[in-house]
Image (tube, helix red, strand yellow):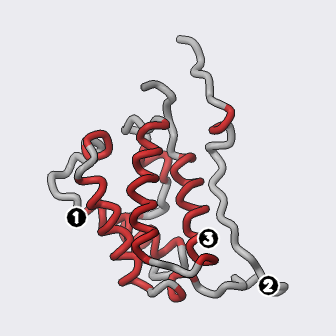
């Protein structure tokens, strides 16, 4: 089988980076993003809005084997809260995130990535965050979506 050609725009897909401004003593200069954007209620709103879009998206919806998207929403909320400085519930309940491994069974191509980002963009916009926090959050989400790519087949 021929090796799949990776488009140049996705050549660095295995890198997930977040822009975080650090002080000299290595603290986040912006503070704790989890707390700054509103803690758990903000992440719940983000995830609920995101899954409204997923529920109506024929490509993404089929990636969720559960009839109810509630458990997937809970997992995403726990993950994002932990990543951004909130409770470590995700790690306590599920262990290391291993995002690429957990998403490997699903066909995540550029179309799926674009759809995921479309619904996540609407969710981020619904939070009406100050630009500095929105940029931090969006930079991570965009890079994470790219890192999940596992095929370039249609």
In front: 126, or 36? 126
**Residue ID at (50%, 84%):** 37
> Residue 22: percent from the left, percent from the top?
76, 79
- Up/down of 24 relative to 54, above or below: below
Give the CA distance from mark 3 to mark 2: 16 Å
Disc 2 secondary structure class: loop
Q: Residue furthest left?
A: 67
Would you name the residue on which mark 2 appears? 23
Residues at badges 3 and 2 in contact (C-beta under 8 Å)?
no
- Up/down of 76 relative to 154, above or below: below
Mark 2 / mark 1, whichever is N-terminal? 2
In front: 59, or 68? 59
> Residue 108: percent from the left, percent from the top?
43, 38
Q: Can you see residue 105?
A: yes
**Residue ID at (65%, 38%):** 9
Disc marking residue 136:
3
Disc 1: CA contacts within 10 A as few (<14), some (14-19) or many (>=20): few
| Disc number lying in front (1 or 3) | 3
Q: Where's the C terminus, which quadrant?
A: top left
Q: Is residue 73 left or right of residue 139?
A: left
Would you name the residue on which mark 1 appears? 70
**Residue ID at (70%, 73%):** 20
> Residue 4: percent from the left, percent from the top?
57, 21
> Residue 84: percent from the left, percent from the top?
54, 75
In front: 49, or 23? 49
């Amino acid at each position: 089988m021929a090796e799949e050609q990776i488009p140049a725009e996705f050549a660095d897909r295995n890198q997930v980076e977040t822009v975080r401004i650090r002080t000299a003593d290595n603290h986040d200069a912006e503070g704790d993003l989890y707390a700054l954007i509103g803690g758990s209620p903000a992440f719940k709103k983000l995830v609920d809005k995101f899954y409204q879009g997923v529920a109506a998206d024929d490509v993404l919806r089929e990636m969720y084997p559960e009839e109810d998207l509630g458990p997937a929403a809970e997992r995403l909320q726990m993950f994002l809260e932990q990543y951004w400085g909130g409770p470590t519930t995700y790690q306590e309940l599920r262990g290391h995130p291993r995002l690429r491994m957990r998403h490997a069974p699903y066909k995540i191509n550029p179309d799926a990535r674009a759809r995921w980002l479309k619904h996540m963009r609407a969710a981020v916009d619904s939070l009406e965050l100050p630009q500095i926090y929105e940029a931090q959050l969006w930079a991570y989400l965009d890079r994470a979506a790219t890192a999940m790519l596992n095929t370039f087949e249609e």
